[in-house]
Image: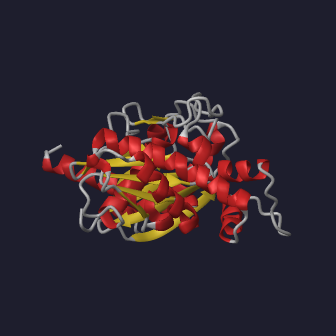
Amino acid sequence: MHTDLVAALDIGGTKIAGALVDGHGRILLRAQRATPAQEDGDTVMGAVEDVIRELTVSPHWGRVRAVGIGSAGPVDAVTGSVSPVNIPGWREYPLVERVRAATGGLPVELIGDGVAITAAEHWQGAARGHDNALCMVVSTGVGGGLVLGGRLHPGPTGNAGHIGHISVDLDGDPCPCGSRGCVERIASGPNIARRALEGGWRPGPDGDTSAAAVAAAARLGDPVAVASFERAAQALAAGIAATATLVEIDIAVIGGGVGKAGDVLFTPLRKALAQYATLSFVQRLTVAPALMGTDAGLVGAAAAAITKKTNETAAGV
C-alpha cells in the first residue's frame, strides 16, 4: 500500500476529525466538525458524513483503499457498532455500516479511540521500541490501549485496555458507565475541574473553569487546584499499576489535554505509582508523556486500517 492512502476518522465527544493518511503516517488532508454529542444519533452521524464528504472531494480520494475509525467507546468491532458513554445518541449504533455506505463501500476497520492512540504511539511515538505498553488518553474521558508482545492488542471487540472504566474507588461516585469510582470519574478533565470547584477553587477574570485553568492555578501553588490534580494522579497510578501487574507492561504513555499539564500531573503521578507498583516485576515501570499530540487518533486509526489491509493481502484475502 506504499502509494495508497487510507481515510482515518477520530470520533470523540468534542470533535469529529478526519484525514487522508499515507503509509508512513503522514497526513495529506484534514477535516473536522464539532460533535453534536447531545443530539440524536443521526444528527451525530450527519457530522461524520460532513467530514467524510470533505475528504471525498480531494483529488487524492481515488487512492484511498480503506477506512480506519478510532471512536470513543465502548465499541464493538464484531458488529461494527458503537455505544460511546459521552455520545448518548449512539447506542449500538451501526457506525461501520454507515461509514462504509458514505465512502462508496470501502473496507472499514473500527477500534476504540484509546486503541487508536496506542497504535500511533507504538508506531511513531513514545511507545516505539517497547513490546509491552499501555497508552492512555486523558481528556474529556479516559481511554487506553495495549501493546503486548510487540503487537497492538485491541481484544475481540476492540476495547482492550479501556483503563478509564477500571474502578479504583469502590465506594466512589457513580460513573455514567454504570459503575462507581472509575478512573475516568476521577481523572478526566471535566472531573478535575468539577472537584476543584467543589473544593472552593475559583477561576480568574476570564471565567475559565477548564482543567487547563486548574492546571495553571496549580502551577501557581493554589492548594485546591494542586489537590485536584494529585487526586487525579492517584487514580491514574492505581489503574496503571493494576494493568502492569496483570499483563507486565514496562511503559505507560499519557496523552490528551490533561496530559499536557506537565509536571502538575506527572510529578504526583510518578510518586503515587511508586506506592502502587510495588511487586518486583513492575518496579521498573516508567511513565512518559505522549509524543503524537492531537494527530494520534487519526494516525492510529490509519495504522489499524493499514495493518488490516496488509494482513489480508498477505493472506490472499
Q: Where on the picture, by quarter, is residue 135? A: bottom left
- The colour mode here is secondary structure
Please tell me which residue lies in front, 169 or 134: 169
Q: In the shown orientation, is residue 256 left or right of residue 248? A: right
Q: Vertically, is 314 above or below 41?
A: below
Q: In the shown orientation, is residue 251 left or right of residue 233? A: left
- Residue 108 position in % (x across, y down): 37, 46
Please tell me which residue lies in front, 89 or 177: 177
- Residue 187 position in % (x across, y down): 58, 49
Looking at the image, which residue is at 51% across and 63% down?
A: 267
- Residue 168 position in % (x across, y down): 52, 37
Q: Vertically, is 20 above or below 312?
A: below
Looking at the image, which residue is at 49% across and 34% down?
A: 94
Q: In the shown orientation, is residue 2 left or right of residue 48? A: left
Residue 275 can be seen, yes or no: yes
Looking at the image, which residue is at 48% across and 67% down?
A: 293
Please tell me which residue lies in front, 294 or 95: 294
Please state, as top left, top right, bottom left or bottom right, where the N terminus lies in the image: bottom left
Q: In the orientation shown, which residue stands out farthest toward the right?
A: 205
Residue 302 can be seen, yes or no: no
